[in-house]
Amino acid sequence: MTTTLLAAAVLSLAEILQASPAGDWRALDPEDTLYLELPSGRVVIELASGYAPKAAAAVRTLVREGYFDGAAIIRSQDNYVVQWARAEDDPRAKAMAAKTLAPEFSRPIDAKLPFTKLAYPDTYAPEVGFSAGFPVARDPRKKQTWLVHCYGSVGVGRDNAADSGNGTELYAVIGQSPRNLDRNITLVGRVVQGIEKFSVLPRGPGPMGFYEKPSEWTPIRGAKLAADVPATERLALEALKTESATFKTVVESRANRKETWFHDPVGRIGVCNVPLPVRVRAP
Amino acid sequence: MTTTLLAAAVLSLAEILQASPAGDWRALDPEDTLYLELPSGRVVIELASGYAPKAAAAVRTLVREGYFDGAAIIRSQDNYVVQWARAEDDPRAKAMAAKTLAPEFSRPIDAKLPFTKLAYPDTYAPEVGFSAGFPVARDPRKKQTWLVHCYGSVGVGRDNAADSGNGTELYAVIGQSPRNLDRNITLVGRVVQGIEKFSVLPRGPGPMGFYEKPSEWTPIRGAKLAADVPATERLALEALKTESATFKTVVESRANRKETWFHDPVGRIGVCNVPLPVRVRAP
């Protein structure tokens, strides 16, 4: 008698997504979509213009100036981050070294930034949830919100000064969410496709996972915004709206595991454990 | 005037460990130390005999019978786990397929299992902390304790039946802590050295990260307990006691970041973000 309900309860993630209405998905904005070409293939990053407008603009400008063509992955620290930049002694890197950019570690809670709250406690923040496709946190008392560091998050490397992160060195998280970095550094987006191309790179043997010689670097063969690629050559990626009913179902199904395999349905989930589905749009 | 205090406050992890008394460290028990030889080098696993005595004993027996010599890594799922076993159609695998083992998903809180509680909230459990070198959780109401899934945790793969995990298929976590597995599967230890040899492996192209053909597998060239290796050939590894004063300092210094780089000292840390130091004992 409860066959349908039961079936609904044990839908897999793939089945939930397959059953979702087209309106629960959004095409990635080509101005916010960055393609990095590695020897192993393409990594796609979505820029979080709503949370880090200055950093996203800086990255966009650098990409359009060809700054990352000829950059390389210079660091891979196990269970932490990969990082890419031009060589320190490269003339363009030197020319940019002293350039500052206002930090965007957090920002005021704003009605224009949607928020789908996660019902479960978090170690690091009073509230966590999702906003326009990104994992975020909030402090209602301080009226602040910020992107949080999860697997695949992309940030703007900096030196000690808060404004020293100008977008010329970027990193992506390849391990356990380093949430202690939240509100200490500007996050500018997340990898939406190809993160494994970063995470399988040999770890750097030097301190903090830096490679010791340029021969160990992985070259970035090109970096382009989707907006600057002919429409026919763009990847037709779409992301599940984190404000949609389908996403709510995804969160519930991942927090309350009904599959036969689970003996304890768990009943909760962490902000960095919720999948943020991105797929190729059906032609 | 507060130079010393200030210096103490900004000691790096390496400096804290360097200043630690020898008594705050314990040699790994050779009966609980498993060496897995991959083509890229050695992975060292510490078995958690206090939390999973039956699973640890089963693994020990399998290792001594040579079961894992000639096994292979058959799965690498990005941001999740690697898994190793003998081929499904291997006669020894077939002979073991139906063998059951009582699950050890959690166990009664026991005075013999030490507990250093972490002061910060956790998404998944009423209490989290550390016990004899492992990250653990507790439910005081249910009087239960269990090992938790962090980066590097090693568990006993199973099918749907709780007792189907007999130790012949093991996995290690190579991504964001999959804490939803806690209390659903038996954890039997953690990787204490060489986890990056697992985490850089190419991801499997099949469903759930399984490789599609044996040619994609990474062979395990040998598996031995340290106890079965001549003492002179053992790695002289020692682990910081998670019940020690030095470990308390480590937790505090990682939760309250005083380094110049940190603009917000954070003031908290998650159970899977605390380093569990293991080093080569000074000769």
Image (cartoon, coloured by chain):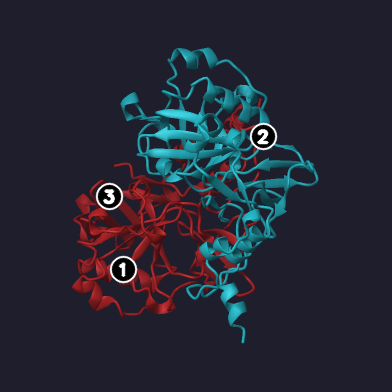
Chain colours: A cyan, B red
Query: Which residue matches tag 1?
Result: B59
- To which chain does the residue with label 3 belong? B
Q: Position of residue B179 (x, y in %)?
A: 53, 61
- Residue linked to disc 2: A105
Q: Which mark is residue A36?
A: none
> Is residue A196 shown to the viewer in this render?
yes
At label 2, counting other C-alpha atoms closer than 10 Å, the crowd grade (few under 14, some 14-19, many 20 or more) is many
Please rate how many residues cluster around mark 3, counting C-alpha atoms within 10 Å: few if below 14, some from 14 to 19, many from 20: some
The x, y position of residue A72, in whole percent, is 41, 28
Residue at image coords 24%, 66%: B87
Quadrant of the snapshot with the N terminus of chain B = top right
Q: Secondary structure at mark 2?
A: loop
Q: Nearer the viewer, residue B112 or B98?
A: B98
Give the image location of residue B24, x and y in percent.
Answer: 45, 49
Q: Quadrant of residue B61?
A: bottom left
Nearer the observer, B22 or A119? A119
